Amino acid sequence: MTARVNGKEPWQLTATEISPYLRKGELKVEDYVKSLLSRIHQRDSAVRAWVFFSPSLILQRAKELDDLPLDQRGPLFGLPVAVKDVILTKDMPTQYNSRMFQTEEASGVDANCVMSLRQSGALIFGKTSTTEFATSKQGNWHQNLTANARDPKRTPGGSSSGSAAAVADCQVPFALGTQTGGSIVRPASFNGCYGFKPTWGAISREGLAQWSVTLDTCGFFTRSIDDLVVLADAFQIKDDDPVPSKSFSLQGAKIGFCKTPNWPQAGEGTRGAMSKAQDILTKHGATVEEFDLPEDFDKVLGWHAAVMAGEGRTSFLGQYLTHKDLMHETIVGHVDNVENVSRKAQLQAYDGCARLRPILDEIASKYDAVITPSVIDEAPVGLENTGDMVSRSPRHRSPRHRSPRHRSPRHTATLCPVC
Amino acid sequence: MTARVNGKEPWQLTATEISPYLRKGELKVEDYVKSLLSRIHQRDSAVRAWVFFSPSLILQRAKELDDLPLDQRGPLFGLPVAVKDVILTKDMPTQYNSRMFQTEEASGVDANCVMSLRQSGALIFGKTSTTEFATSKQGNWHQNLTANARDPKRTPGGSSSGSAAAVADCQVPFALGTQTGGSIVRPASFNGCYGFKPTWGAISREGLAQWSVTLDTCGFFTRSIDDLVVLADAFQIKDDDPVPSKSFSLQGAKIGFCKTPNWPQAGEGTRGAMSKAQDILTKHGATVEEFDLPEDFDKVLGWHAAVMAGEGRTSFLGQYLTHKDLMHETIVGHVDNVENVSRKAQLQAYDGCARLRPILDEIASKYDAVITPSVIDEAPVGLENTGDMVSRSPRHRSPRHRSPRHRSPRHTATLCPVC
């Protein structure tokens, strides 16, 4: 039984809500993590978000943090972060959902992003489930497949499965993920929490599993927009212009709605959610303008596949030579280049995407924000398949709602039905 | 005293020369490494290429390899590789020439490229000196600065200082390096060995220090072209068209000579070496055609600087937050963005380089090969400064010769005056 904060259990609060109590010492980090541990104890058999998790290590770290004088407490003081299990952690194993890397030994090395979090006062809480090497395949080691935080029969999405589920389920306020296709935005959408995939290169990738140097991006999950800002600030993510202040109003704002060339595949859930988002934005005084992308953008999905396959050929060579019999056949196929992606096709993909980048910037510059779907529909039933980032053939159609990728700030208040 | 092979000490031979003896068991790996150890014992006080080096670990690995049946011996069987000390090795420490990472503990994790080498039968020999985090600065930890293998008063170049010096000095046949500016081609040129900086993404970067995701490239050093091919094959580096066979003749070949916009800074050594290369090529029946790059290529060096600074801002954040007082002020300056590189300038650099990539390919497609200088002149005297990849202002001028980046195969036979 831990102390309640503002009439709630500590695990129910967002990072922004609980942070002042921790920093001022009004709530001990030890008591906060005990509250989270009780939440996990209650929920883990249903959600199964964790692949490494040591209560004794967590409590030890909590006590070390509690010993810090108030004036040495960093911006993330005492805030627990779940780490996707393709990111190195010096005091915990990193297993990549690969039978080749099954171990109880700590990695000995911190990824650069983990180093930044620790130094800002965060508590590295444990490692969360992922697909094998964060590719599109479920992997061959985890026996206890992670479930969606909202419905145990549905997938949480992937590859950042456990990170999204743990945050959405109020087991931790923060989690790190990575994205090469839709591995942050899809699980965030499926579980109903926020996923932030920052621009490429905004967070160091040193110490992360590599699939595609061109695409791999480190990002994170939270349960509030304010919490996204806290982590973005900790990683010093900034643009040339300052971020609009909290008093930013939608009155008179111009919002672009980009359906992308994949809109015909959107299910009823996605269509309904986007329509609802438009209504909310309009009601708050914004103008929502639909726009189409120029024809060349039809090729992006093919280029994306060529880059993933071409770069996957070299990225997985070390594992392939070590134990290809323990790898998913799709990953083995990347190294064997079964798709026969030529170097020429890979270069055409690089050049094609590079040509479109400033064109997309030019289009986006006409709007205060752009909204676009993050998945084709709500989380499908079943845990074996984490869903597609988008299907190139229209074969996934399931009804019900899901969340748009960019929500209006006003919309966020209604997000979390759990806590 | 170890057995002589072909009338030479084993340490004198290239990998290609010694490999058949090792694979057939006619020379024990143990005897080969003892020969290398004797060479290092004799030379280390002058060259100081190594920052971690354990004869007992080397001998243990050698014995394990000698126990392998002949039919299980991989393509790199028993061939020692030096590893630049910004690349993770599970059984050796990784210290980045940073006081922050001074340790005797093994990293616990192998970089993907090290994994590939081990699985191909290579013997990971030790860790070689680098500048701090492989940036342009010498670093603040190494007390024994590495010397050029040819002249102890001169720099070996950087940042892959020890890797180039160890190979050129016949202490190992192979070494791994990394390049963000000229960190492979410069030390190879300065020390008089071969440096191969493959195309971006050809070798996995997982487990390597990160400075610039756009530029960082893993590559290697050898003392013969045949040895370059052995390593390129081990890393499965291939293009759409097969590599020309060994019987490739220069007769009738068309060679482009690209002076680049930085040619005015070339010293007498560089001018002489390029002129000599032209003579040799012409004498063997090739036509050498000088060509200029279109005007926009003048901007590449500025874009390169913008990308390094902009990406350095995020790459070094973890170390900065951990112990910026222990970092070189130039690296701290990257994180603080003292050069005020705007996001807009960084994007212009990306777009500018992307626009020129196919133009350069188009130009290069007219030739069988292109030669261009790899440094502005020979290695300068002094060990504190590892030399510039190229100076943006013409302030480096020193006489004498140096080697062109791409040599004709015939020229290689005369390369190594040491062994």
Image (spheres, coloured by chain):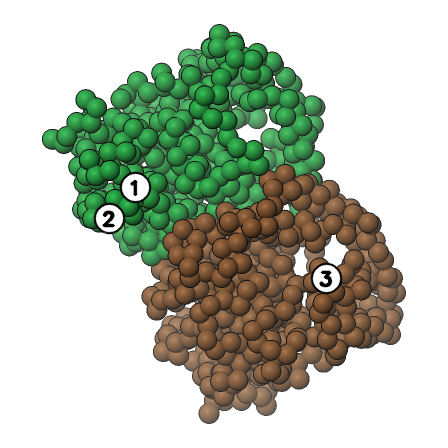
Chain colours: A brown, B green
Instruction: Provide the secondary structure element on which disc 1 rests.
Output: loop
According to the picture, the residue beneath numbered tag 3 turns out to be A393
Q: Chain of mark 2?
A: B
Q: CA distance from mark 2 to mark 3?
A: 49 Å
| Left or right of residue A19: residue A268 | right
Residue at screen point 39% across, 73% down? A61
The residue under label 3 is which amino acid type?
Ser
Question: How many residues crowd mark 1 within 10 Å: few (<14), some (14–19), many (20+)?
Answer: many
Residue B191 seen from this side: yes
Residue A182, horizontal then vertical, whole percent: 64, 62
Instruction: Provide the secondary structure element on which disc 2 rests.
Output: loop
| Left or right of residue A27: residue A408 | right
Earlier-in-chain disc, 2 versus 1:
2
Q: Chain of mark 1?
A: B
The residue under label 1 is which amino acid type?
Phe
Q: CA distance from mark 2 to mark 1?
A: 10 Å
Number of callouts in the render?
3
Residue B55, horizontal then vertical, whole percent: 19, 43
Residue A408 seen from this side: no
Image quarter of the C terminus of chain A: bottom right
